[in-house]
Amino acid sequence: MLCCCLGSSLRVSAFSRVGGASRKPSCPGDGVLPRLLLQSNRGVDQYLWTCNLASQLAHSLVPTEPPRPPLHPPLPHCVCLLSWKLSETLWTQRGQRDIYSEMLDWPHCCPLDQYQVDPFVPQLLSVSDLLQSLRSSCWSSLLPPGVLSSSQVNSALSWSCRMLTSDPRTGDSLRPRPLLLVGVLQLPSERSEFTQSLELRDATAAVSCVVTETTEQDDGGQRSAFNTAWIGSLVCVRSFTMVTERFLQSEFPSCRHLDQNGFISNRTSRVYLQFSLDHLIILSPSVTMATHLRMRGAEPGSDDLHRNKREEEEGDDEGSCLKKRRCDEELSSSVAMVTAHEGGEPPRPCISMVIRVESKGGVAWRNAVIGGSDEGAGLQLGFSATALLIGPVVSWARDPKNQPMMEKEAEPEREEKVLLQFSGVSSRWFPLLQPGSVYRLTAPNTQDSSVLIGCSVAGQKGVELHADSSLQVRPDWRIHTLTRPLLLPHTWTQAPPPSVLSVSQVLDCRSEVVTFQGRVTERVSLMDRRGGASGVRLTVCDQSGRSLCVYLDLSHAPYPPGLLPGNQVLLSGFLRKISRSGAVYCSLSPVGCVTVTSLGDSSRLAPPPAPSMHLAHWASSKTVEAQVKGHVVCVLHLQLQWSCCHQGGQNTQVCSSHCGSAAFRATARLVMDDGTAEAHVWLSGQPVQAALGLADSQWAGLQRVVRVRGHVQVFPGGRSLRTDGDTEDVLLHFLLSLCSGDVIGQQVTLTCRKWTNQSSAEVRRFSRGDRDFLTRRLRPLQLTCSHLELQEES
């Protein structure tokens, strides 16, 4: 292609014959892309980017099989319109050219010298290319460098997560340029890997998505997506996070053997996206989305749903407005082949009723009738939701979709509830049914109002029933969100949301079933006896810093995406339990539900600081983790050892000086006092080096000395400072003097957790005097240290 600048001249020397050139069927007859360069004052780089965008859209959106006539015009006829609309939206913030200044004021130079590739120009990818790139590179890096034992390596590899952003300026990215995705938002299909999330689909593939949106409240917080109008809309995702969760069953001797696949017995990965609806550009709205935008006062195709129409009020002439409207209409009709718009459906009678969802259970495998009564029963995915009936069943000549409520659909004095049962195909509505939202449930091709009337539970005479009527949702029924139910009574529209507790309130309350929300700070995969993943343990905290462990048993439920550190989750219907040691934790109940309400960045997530407390106050409180300041009273036990997994676990002597699977471990037990009480503290790893006050070079030299022997234990004797063993041993004498001299009395700051799993065998290992000391003084508080800092003496 020859690109001419505005300082060049063009002279026509000859003309071709009429009809000599054939038009390309992939571009409209009016020449959209050349007109973009001339009428919109776009630069050469913008024009080339738009041409490349058109070819990419043709690859990702045009189906390989030809459409059936006479449904819709072929999609290649509108990819230029799509690229034009997307280019107008993305290049608006980059400014316009001043062509008169370029011709008159600027000195003439070749456009090849002016043209520079902008590294931050977005790059469009198809869904299949994105999935292939993520899966091909997901096993490139498993663990950060460091010396770990065999159990630590395999436990860390059982579940790991890799998160990439679409914009390289905000974190680790898949490509050096920002990425764009264009596709249709759909409900999860039967073949979807994640049945609890939406899908973004184009002509090449589909990817699951964890979607949130901004609430309409003043705080501007996030909530899970609830508007069904997004289903069937062709959108462009501007900002998203790519998540790859890796599951690995391995028997690695150490982290130095991660490049040897012979130690891997099974590995799988799951890929999905996380984004907010605020980062979407609507290229072609569905019928319900167009209705929703008209009610909101926004223009279809705008990237900002919270602003009113503005294009016509910014000086556009009548011709350009008519042309833009014509292009939008042609685009909507053309994209209908891929987005499955319902606009061309013939009018069909139907019935509907308006409901408000009160609560929702989680998706699980349940016994259900498959196909019909003749085929028998089997396991199917399903969930249940309790809804409040707002009005009676209404008959329609055609589907009202998400049109505003009418007076005949509301019945203010009605307070009847119904239990909606979703199973099989109908369980795909799970991602968009959220408590507190209002929906219109529609049954097509019928005028029989009894279809939407739930059946009551039969009971004996004289027995009071507390069960709601049940209604089985059929696969062909439709659900539409009513975002502005203006006809609802004031008491219903202003009804408070369901009681949602914080983590601190769950720790202090006495309820057996709780609904609470918090931010995930840690995720651990639970393994069964066979080495497979059987569940998930989440550590959830609130703004106060108090944390709570939540256990999810996934043996009878599908795997839920989005349970990542940094995300905020809503846990509904969980069982609050107390362990034998008095710690509070929660577990998933048969009707429990997990919903991701806000997305976070785990790479930038900093765990909340542990509260600073005195030992006496901590012993009487329910806080699990805290920071304490005090001095070391005595050291009870110190153990240094090297372990080798080739000889069956921990050994007293290393098999070879050059063995790559050997790992060094250090543990210690000491007593500290802060003036209010004393505590028994367990140390392991780096805190042991800090407690002994050894520099890195001294610590490395101590490891080399211990490596010759393999295993060293020191019992300083507690308060009596008794010494056991051979006093002629130089290493033992050095460690005894180090524990009794340099460590005693030094000021330390510890970040600890309460240790609640001490067995009776551990207590019997101490002498009678030490056991009496532990029983009288340390029984209320036993700690495991995760971080230790030495304080300078004042």
Image (cartoon, grey):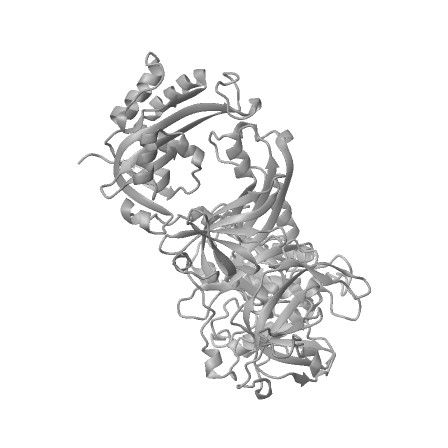
- Residue under the point 44% across and 33% down: 761
Q: Which one is nearer the viewer's eye here, 676 or 153? A: 676
Q: Is residue 642 above or below residue 614?
A: above
Whether residue 594 is situated above or below residue 670 in the rendered picture: below
Across and down, in percent, residue 478 comes to 66, 72
State left or right for residue 654 relative to residue 686: right
Q: Quadrant of the C terminus?
A: top left
Q: Nearer the viewer, residue 191 or 111?
A: 191
In this view, the residue in front, 505 or 294, is 505
The residue at 58%/66% (across/down) is 432
Measuring from the top left, give residue 472's x and y in whole percent: 68, 71
x and y percent of residue 342 in the render?
Answer: 69, 73
Do we see residue 496 in this rendering? Answer: yes
762 sits left or right of 11 in the view: left
Q: Given the current orientation, which residue lies at the most extreme right position?
A: 374
Farthest residue to the bottom: give it.
407
What's the residue at 55%, 38% (across, down)? Answer: 157
The location of residue 205, given as percent across then percent down, is: 68, 54
Q: Quadrant of residue 456?
A: bottom right
**Quadrant assignment, res 443:** bottom right
Residue, far left: 794
